[in-house]
Image: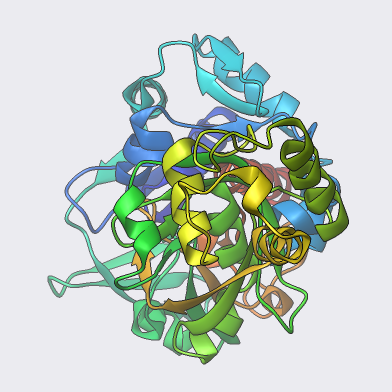
């Protein structure tokens, strides 16, 4: 039996290894359009590979998986983050969980994960073909699949697993057209936001540990560290917000208002109380020399000027109404976003093959027996923190288990 896996990313390679262990007599081929496998894994987590998350800080599955939460909740019962950790540790990778619940290899080197997976693929006899671009997948009358390649050749397989990852354009899914599947138009996810010519851009490199970002007039909001860049805003808070609001921001062409609470989830009244405390305890000190501990001096100086307050003024010179105005701005600082920036090389999309096409317990196509999907090619995406890779490992595992179970039945 020939099993063809289209795409040598995290889901595809993991699925191939699991299949080879479960079906040692099957011929397993992985076709990758790029020149090497696992290119995205090699750069994830800033090159350190945030391969999963402990899920300790996850309040709801929707907060980790803006699209596909219900499916992921079900699949994670089959292969959880604990299972992922055990799998890699048994393969010889030592892991460490950070305070933010992200899990990395102790080596802090993503290439350790890449080399582990490619080693296991070779060890189990998985055939890897690079520079092999698939242009067409068709289901033949005899139940097999015909896979058309860009070089004009054709590959036959009894079973096909599509793990091509997210596609920023709908044309990236053209290979599936003969199968008549429902497709959700893709939209970029996990991106930073641009603030052209805004004074905050002069503070590039500044990090605020806990900020809440929201889009006024909507329910979209996210909290976490915020990073000021030379083009605008980035960091976990912004990346999570971009994931939650991916379609909304695409529809408004990335022109939107954005509200920042520089004090995390503190209310305006709580921020006012903090400022009043500084006002009472340091009346003769300059505003620029005494400031809330969650902000650094450069950012505080900038925010004062944006609120039309003189940094060199003394706290005693502030009228109570100025404190009220300053607290209102610090807890609800409205900015105008104009455009987005890609988040390094870790490009993620929402959209793809609609979940209605697949059986949730096996990820097999409802219309085409022997056709499976795993990873970001499905309409499943996650926020930063190792959740996207967790989805890839989990779905790759579930597909391999499902194929093996189906093939071993009498």
Q: Nearer the viewer, residue 103 or 240?
A: 240
* Residue 266 visible here: no
**Which color scheme does this rendered protein use?**
rainbow
Q: Nearer the viewer, residue 388 or 311?
A: 311
Q: Is residue 289 left or right of residue 329?
A: left
User: Residue 65's quadrant in the figure?
Assistant: bottom right
Image position of 284 with respect to 224: above or below = above
Q: Nearer the viewer, residue 343 or 143?
A: 343
Residue drawn at the location 49% of the way across and 9% of the way down:
92
Image position of 404 with respect to 119: above or below = below
Residue 113: x and y in percent read 41, 25
* Residue 404 visible here: yes
Residue 394: x and y in percent read 66, 43
Residue drawn at the location 40% of the way across and 39% of the way down:
44
Q: Is residue 283 left or right of residue 188?
A: right
Residue 188: x and y in percent read 46, 72
Residue drawn at the location 51% of the way across and 32% of the way down:
50
Image position of 364 with respect to 292: above or below = below
Figure disc tally: 0
Residue 26: x and y in percent read 48, 41
Q: Is residue 66 left or right of residue 175?
A: right
Q: Residue furthest left?
A: 151
User: Residue 351's quadrant in the figure?
Assistant: bottom right
């Amino acid at each position: 039996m020939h099993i063809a896996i289209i795409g040598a990313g995290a889901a595809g390679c993991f699925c191939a290894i699991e299949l080879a262990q479960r079906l040692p007599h099957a011929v397993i081929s992985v076709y990758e359009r790029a020149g090497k496998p696992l290119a995205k894994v090699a750069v994830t987590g800033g090159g350190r590979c945030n391969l999963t998350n402990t899920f300790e800080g996850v309040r709801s599955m929707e907060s980790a998986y803006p699209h596909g939460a219900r499916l992921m909740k079900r699949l994670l019962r089959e292969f959880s983050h604990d299972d992922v950790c055990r799998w890699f540790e048994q393969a010889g990778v030592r892991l460490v969980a950070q305070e933010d619940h992200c899990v990395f290899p102790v080596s802090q080197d993503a290439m350790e994960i890449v080399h582990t997976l490619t080693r296991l693929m070779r060890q189990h006899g998985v055939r890897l073909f690079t520079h092999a671009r698939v242009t067409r997948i068709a289901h033949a009358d005899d139940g097999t699949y015909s896979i058309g390649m860009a070089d004009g050749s054709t590959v036959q397989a009894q079973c096909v697993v599509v793990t091509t990852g997210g596609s920023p354009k709908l044309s990236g899914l053209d290979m599936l057209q003969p199968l008549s599947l429902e497709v959700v138009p893709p939209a970029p996810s996990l991106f930073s936001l641009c603030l052209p010519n805004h004074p905050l851009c002069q503070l590039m490199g500044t990090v605020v540990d806990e900020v809440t970002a929201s889009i006024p007039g909507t329910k979209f909001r996210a909290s976490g560290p915020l990073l000021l860049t030379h083009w605008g805003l980035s960091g976990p808070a912004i990346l999570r917000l971009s994931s939650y609001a991916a379609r909304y921001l695409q529809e408004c062409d990335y022109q939107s208002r954005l509200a920042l609470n520089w004090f995390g989830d503190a209310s305006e009244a709580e921020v006012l109380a903090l400022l009043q405390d500084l006002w009472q305890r340091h009346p003769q000190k300059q505003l620029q020399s005494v400031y809330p501990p969650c902000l650094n001096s450069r950012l505080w100086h900038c925010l004062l000027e944006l609120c039309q307050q003189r940094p060199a003024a003394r706290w005693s010179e502030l009228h109570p109404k100025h404190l009220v105005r300053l607290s209102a701005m610090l807890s609800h600082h409205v900015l105008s976003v104009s455009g987005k920036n890609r988040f390094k090389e870790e490009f993620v999309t929402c959209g793809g093959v609609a979940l209605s096409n697949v059986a949730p317990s096996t990820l097999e196509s409802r219309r085409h027996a022997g056709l499976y999907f795993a990873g970001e090619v499905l309409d499943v995406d996650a926020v930063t923190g190792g959740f996207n890779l967790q989805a890839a490992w989990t779905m790759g595992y579930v597909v391999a288990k499902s194929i093996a179970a189906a093939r071993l039945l009498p």
